[in-house]
Image (spheres, grey):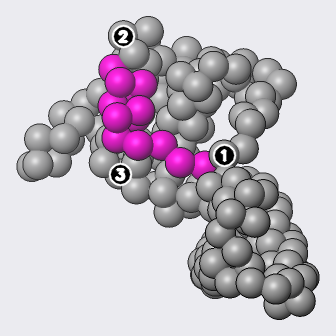
Amino acid sequence: MPRSTQTDLAVLAALSIEPMTGYALRDAIRVHLGAFWSESFGQIYPALARLRADGLVAADEGDRSGSNVHSLTAAGRARLVELMRETPTSTPPRNGMLLRLFFGSVLGAAACRELVADARSQALAMLDHLATARRATEAEPDHLPQRPYWLMTISAGEHSARAAIAWADETLATLDALPD
């Protein structure tokens, strides 16, 4: 699935929850999907224009700010279902910390220790963020159809963050045993 199609999927899926302005859409993706997905304004606004042109999204004049409120059309909902049924594509990871660690003999153990300690701190911060998301999601009404799926996604993030912390602890111990 090309990057633009993945952006379309994220935009259509977010709009399936409720109509939003482009700014609110970017914020919703950042806040609710940020643990595993990101989209920039530079991706969202062209996607909205393309989806409007294709009749998948409608835009109504919004609030006093002049921002358009975008909503999913029936064709947009059908396209969302098509996109969600496609096999997800895996994007090769780009992890600058692991790239540096792989070539860590150039930096030395002390510098690599700082990189790994920072990665551990980021994973702890992600766990805190996910705990907040879990509390907010668990406070949603039980009958909300998205709720169990949101909780499953949060759980995946929690597992990943805990694994990152365990890996960092193991790696820090190994780095401590290396000469600098």
Q: Is residue 43 magenta?
A: yes
Q: Reading the chain from its start, which is encountered first: label 1 or label 3?
A: 3
Depth check: 102 or 64 in front?
A: 102
Depth check: 90 or 15 in front?
A: 90
**Which image quarter is the N terminus in?**
top right
Tell me residue 75's x, y (percent): 55, 15
Q: Reading the chain from its start, which is encountered first: label 2 or label 1?
A: 2
Q: Is residue 10 magenta?
A: no
Q: Reading the chain from its start, which is encountered first: label 3 or label 2?
A: 3
Dot 2: within a 10 Å radius of its alpha carbon, few (fewer than 14), some, or many (20 or more) residues?
few
Residue ID for mark 1: 94
Depth check: 25 or 57 in front?
A: 25
Q: Is residue 41 visible?
A: yes
Q: Are marks 1 and 3 in contact (CB under 8 Å)?
A: no
Q: Secondary structure at mark 1?
A: loop
Q: Is residue 125 above or below residue 22?
A: below
Tell me residue 160's x, y (percent): 81, 67
Please give left or right for residue 33 compared with residue 92 in the image. Answer: left
Figure quadrant of residue 80: top right
The label number, if any, that marks residue 53 in the structure image: 2
Depth check: 169 or 110 in front?
A: 110
Magenta stretch: dominant SS?
helix
Residue ID for mark 3: 24
> Which residues make up the magenta segment?
36-49
Residue located 35% across and 24% down the image: 46
> Mark 1: which amino acid?
Arg
Q: Secondary structure at mark 3?
A: helix
> Mark 2: which amino acid?
Ala
Figure quadrant of residue 140: bottom right
Residue located 73% across and 65% down the image: 104
Q: Is residue 30 above or below residue 139?
A: above
